[in-house]
């Protein structure tokens, strides 16, 4: 082989495309040369016609190969675009779910804080000392009976 990239990755694709382009240009040059020969030297007409036929055939085959390669490339781009779109949808869904969870957690936290404030206000209304409030178990937000309040105070 030529030692360069062999069609793997963008460098290889670029290299292959350049090689094919060069072959097409050589084919066009051969066709132009054959046309010039036919025009200037009628005795080489059969040779020139043969060269033109071979050149047209080779150029057509190369163009078909390039077209097929481009079609594969378009398919690959479409496939990657589809995967990117799927990933974007998953990320959007995850972000939405995350936002909903944060909103619910914030709401729950606000409710818990409101209950704490009410409990502390009840303590002070009933004359409970501040050190008793400090001992209050903040996790247990069940209603506190007057008997429990008297024990705290």
Image (tube, rainbow, N blue to C red):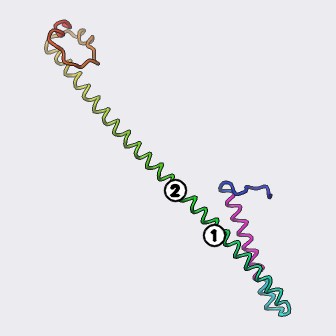
Q: Residues within 10 Å of mark 2 (few under 14, many from 20)?
A: few
Do labels 2 and 1 touch, CB within 8 Å? no
Residue 136 locus on image (x, y percent): 25, 13
User: Which residue occupies 17% across, 10% down?
Assistant: 149
User: Which residue occupies 81% across, 91% down?
Assistant: 40
In the rendered image, residue 25 lying in the magenta stretch gets the answer yes
Q: State which quarter of the image contains the C terminus.
A: top left
Marker disc for residue 81 = 2
Residue 96 locus on image (x, y percent): 37, 43
- Residue range (magenta): 12-31
Q: Would you say 49 lies left or right of 98 here?
A: right
Marker disc for residue 67 = 1
Quadrant of res 118: top left
Residue most extreme to the bottom: 42
Q: State which quarter of the image contains the N terminus.
A: bottom right
Under tag 1, what secondary structure? helix
Quadrant of res 101: top left
């Amino acid at each position: 082989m030529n030692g360069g990239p062999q069609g793997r990755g963008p460098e290889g694709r670029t290299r292959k495309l350049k090689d094919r382009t060069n072959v097409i240009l050589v084919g066009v040059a051969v066709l132009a040369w054959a046309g010039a020969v036919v025009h200037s030297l009628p005795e080489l007409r059969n040779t020139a016609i043969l060269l033109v036929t071979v050149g047209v055939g080779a150029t057509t085959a190369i163009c078909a190969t390039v077209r097929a390669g481009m079609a594969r490339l378009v398919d690959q781009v479409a496939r990657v675009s589809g995967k990117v779109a799927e990933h974007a949808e998953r990320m959007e869904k995850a972000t939405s779910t995350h936002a909903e969870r944060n909103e619910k957690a914030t709401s729950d936290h606000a409710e818990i804080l409101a209950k704490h404030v009410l409990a502390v206000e009840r303590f002070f209304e009933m004359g409970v000392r501040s050190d008793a409030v400090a001992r209050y178990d903040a996790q247990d937000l069940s209603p506190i009976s007057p008997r429990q309040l008297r024990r705290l105070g």
